[in-house]
Amino acid sequence: DSGKIYKYAVRATNSDAKSSYQNSSNIGVLETPVSKISSSAKGVKITFEPVSGAEKYIIYRSDYDSSSKNWSGSKKIATLKSTENSYVDTSAISGKKCRYKVKAYNGSCKSKTKVSNSILYIAAPTVAISNGNSAIDVKWTESKGAKSYTVYRSEYDSKNKKWSKWASVSSELKTLKFSDKNVKHAKKYKYAVLAKIGDTTSSYNPSSSMYRLNKTSISTAIAVSGVTIKW
């Protein structure tokens, strides 16, 4: 059973005599953690089922080198407590395939490992928005390895107090900025940009929300008692 500590003894016998027992050292049995991986806004998320008897877990990552077509050796990236069974690898390299394995420990006893499926990780762009003269200007950070970007927008429904589903407003962009002119004054919006490599996309990492405010025209005139300002 996983989490149990065992020891064994052996002695030799024949029809006339028996030897003394020779005891083995203690040995433990721990189940092999099976990990699942997925892309998240901050990195690659690794989850696994807790292993009975485990005192800690160590997570390892291997990266794929597309030039040599080989996987790198396993690199230790994190040590988790027995109460933890998920981790976000913020050191994953954007534009590279990676895979993971988790090893459970109890003292000197350690489990076997099983390598996860691989994932092509693409860093989620960080998005910033601002009110332009005639549009909401959207800018985002570069995701290493990305071939194009798609901009998504969500609108706030003040009557029903909820956000709309994400809808694409521009796709296959090669730049790191976009001006959304199809917006309404006093309407609240937020944006997300997905980076893309082939058929693989990054996760959503939404911007903060903002009201669209049209540019205000101002006129001034000198009056007897001062300056009159109108807008």
Image (cartoon, rainbow, N blue to C red):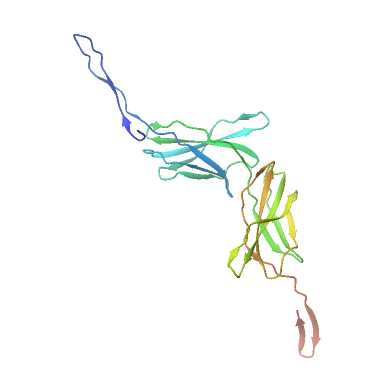
Spot occupied by residue 2 in the image (x, y as percentages of width and height): 36, 34
Spot occupied by residue 149 in the image (x, y as percentages of width and height): 71, 49
- Residue drawn at point x = 40 percent, y = 42 percent: 82
- Residue drawn at point x = 42 percent, y = 41 percent: 50
* 87 w.r.t. 101: above or below: below
- Residue drawn at point x = 19 percent, y = 11 percent: 17
Task: Tell me which corner region of the image, top left, top right, bottom left or bottom right, holds residue 179.
Answer: bottom right
103 vs 212, left or right, is left
* 39 w.r.t. 130: above or below: above
Outermost residue, bottom side: 224
Task: Tell me which corner region of the image, top left, top right, bottom left or bottom right, holds residue 159.
Answer: bottom right
Spot occupied by residue 8 in the image (x, y as percentages of width and height): 29, 24
Number of callouts: 0
Outermost residue, left side: 16
* 189 w.r.t. 218: above or below: above
* 85 w.r.t. 154: above or below: above
State the residue in front, 36 or 216.
36
Task: Tell me which corner region of the image, top left, top right, bottom left or bottom right, holds residue 64.
Answer: top right
135 vs 38, left or right, is right
Quadrant in the picture for the C terminus: bottom right
Outermost residue, front side: 160
Quadrant in the picture for the N terminus: top left
Spot occupied by residue 68 in the image (x, y as percentages of width and height): 66, 28
